[in-house]
Image (tube, rainbow, N blue to C red):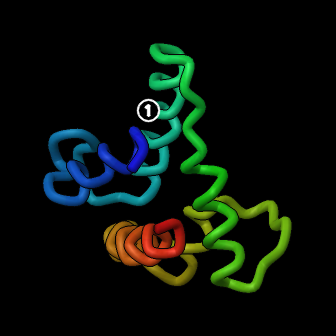
Amino acid sequence: MDYVENMLEIIKNDYGVLIGKKSISELATFICAYELGVHDATGVECRFNREFQGFVEEKHNLKHTSKHWTEIISEGKGPEEAFDFFFDYWNEFKTTRA
């Protein structure tokens, strides 16, 4: 499990501490900032966003879309529902990488 996935476990169990509210856009912003921080501090390139984007595109039969994974997951959902769907997708994503 990489840096981002460790942090996602924390957010999943207590999102209020790190992102304030149950919102997929807040979550995505945090993930991007966290990846940059990890890279700056350690030199390690986090690939979560890129790999998860590909997973979501494949799940929705999209190729090379300009839509970010947050937009794809959020379609037809409110921010809290999309947040919950993210973690469903993330659980599935983890099993494909195992």
Q: Residues within 10 Å of mark 1 (few under 14, many from 20)?
A: some
Tell me which residue sits at (78%, 78%) in the image. Answer: 62
Image coordinates for residue 72, horizontal then vertical, percent = 62, 72
Q: Type of residue at label 1?
A: Tyr
Q: Is residue 92 above or below residue 45?
A: below
Q: Measured along the vertical axis of the image, is residue 5 above or below residue 79?
A: above
Task: Specify whether 6 is left or right of 24.
Answer: left
Q: State the SS at label 1.
A: helix
Judge whether 79 appears above or below 19 on screen. below
- Snapshot quadrant of residue 2: top left
Query: Looking at this view, is 8 or 25 the one in front?
Result: 8
Can you identify the residue that label 1 sits on? 34
Q: Which of 79 and 15 is in front in this view?
A: 15
Query: How far across and down, in percent of the image, does residue 92 sit?
Result: 44, 77
Up the image or down, 42 lies above or below 60; here it is above
Where's residue 45, x and y in %?
Answer: 59, 31
Q: Which residue is drawn at 32% across and 73% down?
A: 84
Residue 78 is at least partly visible in this image: no
